Amino acid sequence: MMPDGEVVGPDTVKKTCCISQNVDEHVKFVQQYADLGFDTFFIHSAGPDQKAFLEGYGCDSLPKLRSQIHGRVAVASAD
């Protein structure tokens, strides 16, 4: 049996996820899928402070996402 890390390596993760604190990288990542017609995205943080993550993402990333995607994608957040 292979350990999980050997099955899905860091290159696969980099291609399929956006793991970054850079707002522009998040916008670019979501934009590529919006251009393909996706209209729902789930944004997740693995960190312990989900409230701080959601507040920060809402202030920093969501405004840029909304302006870049031109209203084609509905954005909802959890309280």
Image (cartoon, rainbow, N blue to C red):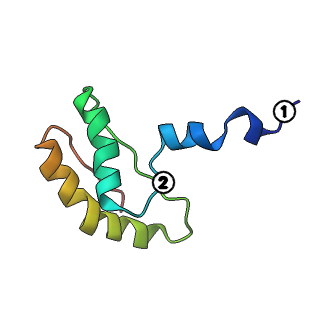
Pointer 2: residues within 10 angstroms few (<14), some, or many (20+)?
A: few
Judging depth in this view, the residue of 68 and 53 nearest the camera is 68
Residue 79 horizontal/vertical position (percent): 36, 63
The percent coordinates of residue 34 (x first, y second) are 25, 34
- Secondary structure under tag 2 reads loop
Q: Quadrant of residue 56?
A: bottom left
The Cα–Cα distance between marks 1 and 2, rounded to whole angstroms, is: 25 Å
**Front one among 42 and 8:** 8
Asked whether, in this view, residue 77 is left or right of residue 7, the answer is: left
Kind of residue sitting beneath label 1: Met
Which corner quadrant holds the N terminus?
A: top right
- The circle drawn on residue 19 is 2
Q: Residue furthest front?
A: 11
Q: Residue at x 34, y 44 (%)?
A: 29
Relative height, residue 15 to residue 48 (above, below): above
SS for dot 1 = loop
Residue 2 vs 42, above or below: the answer is above
Image location of residue 53, percent across then percent down: 41, 67
Task: Determine whether, in the image, residue 79 is placed left or right of residue 68.
Answer: right
**Residue at screen point 16% across, 47% down:** 68
| Side of 68 relative to 21 (left or right) | left
Residue at which label 1 appears = 2
Identify which amino acid the numbered label 2 is placed on.
Ile
